[in-house]
Amino acid sequence: MKSIKQRNETPWIVALTIIINAVIVLLFFMPKYKGASHLDLTFLPMMNAIFNSFTTIFLLTAFYFIKKKNIKMHRRFIFAAFGTTALFFLTYLTYHSLAESTSYGGEGPLKYLYYFILITHIVLAIPTVFLALFTATKGLNMQVEQHKKMARFTMPIWLYVSITGVLVYLMISPYY
């Protein structure tokens, strides 16, 4: 039996990343479930923003603890960030499987800013699943040097995605 350090989790991480991203893409092409048309689901995007806010807080706290060389607390806050990201994913899937997408109604420069933030958020969210899982796996397997190298760009990307998720919500929320 291989020890944890000898296992290659990369195929599982790649498979999970593909599945998660494929489910999200499929949601936008699938017909919406009509049985929920009488439900007010506008609270779900707000929940997404709340979960993204907590992800940001947890990531920053994890960063603080690793700078203090407190691996135990760093690991706990990374797990918390994964937890709130998973809750975000569930509420996101629920909302987009039951409700039509909301269009941004702003005009002028704010419209361009909104679409810039939205597009960069989406483009960077796609690889974040892989990066976060791969980086965490290196840390859990105590492959410290590889973990540090990956975390140097995984952390800022994950933070950007979680922060811009909140910004997208704040900018589009008046149009729900």
Image: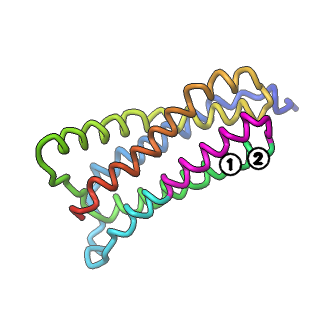
Q: Are marks 1 and 2 in contact (CB under 8 Å)?
A: yes
Q: How is the image coloured?
A: rainbow
Is 176 or 171 nearer to us in this picture? 171
Three-letter code, disc 2: Met
**SS for callout 1:** helix
Q: Which residues are the magenta region? A: 51-71
Which residue is the site of mark 2?
73
| Magenta stretch: includes residue 95 | no
Rendered residue at 73%/49% (across/down): 76
- Where the C terminus falls, by quadrant? bottom left
Three-letter code, disc 1: Phe
Q: Is residue 18 left or right of residue 79?
A: left
Q: Quadrant of residue 114?
A: top left
Rendered residue at 31%/39% (across/down): 117
Which residue is the site of mark 1?
77
Against 171, residue 15 (above or below) is: above
* Mark 1 crowd level (few <14, some 14–19, many ≥20, 10 Å Cα): many
Marks 1/2: CA–CA distance: 6 Å
Is 74 or 34 nearer to us in this picture? 74
**SS for callout 2:** helix
